[in-house]
Amino acid sequence: MQCEPRPNDKHKKEMMAVQDSMDVLSGKWKISIISSICYYNKRRFSDILGDVEGISNRMLSKELKELEINQLVKRTVLDTQPVTVQYELTEHGLTLKTIINNLTDWGMEHRKKIIGE
């Protein structure tokens, strides 16, 4: 009987890094929210709500707060009547741009492969 090789420390650290990434970005909505902001650079709450099909006001608010806590999104309250809230990616959030673009490309190719669109 052959035993599985024991994971080395480098592999463990890599797996922890993947898990950390997934903890920050997981869920049904976060990638879509980031993608909306990334595409337009700056986005109002109502614009994101329109972009992300199926999300409720409450859930969008919750997800944006989590993205702010993780320093991926910056919230700015504009001095307008009525008050407008604008979101943009932080410098740290902008590091996700390549990942978002790669996911977009992969998703388009995957759709073509699976359903021919």
Image (spheres, rainbow, N blue to C red):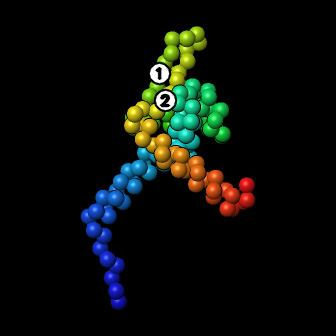
Q: Is residue 13 visible?
A: yes
Q: Residue at x 52, y 45 (%)?
A: 100
What is the number of the mark on residue 68? none
- Quick one: which residue is furthest to the left in this view? 9
Quarter in which the C terminus is drawn: bottom right
Q: Amino acid at mark 2?
A: Glu
Q: Give the class, few, some or many, for how many residues have Cα within 10 Å of label 2's Cα (few <14, many ≥20).
A: many
Amino acid identity at mark 1: Thr
Mark 1 in CB contact with mark 2 (< 8 angstroms):
yes
Q: Which residue is the site of mark 2?
A: 88
**Residue extending furthest bottom?**
1
Kindly identify which residue carries mark 1: 76
Q: Would residue 15 appear left or right of 48 to someone viewing this image? A: left
Residue at the spot 61% in from the left edge and 53% down from the top edge: 107
Percent from the top left, x then y, of residue 34? Answer: 52, 38
Earlier-in-chain disc, 1 versus 2 = 1
Which one is in front in this view, the residue at disc 1 or the one at disc 2? 2
Q: Visible in this render: residue 58?
A: no
Which quadrant does the N terminus fall into?
bottom left
Q: CA distance from mark 1 to mark 2?
A: 8 Å
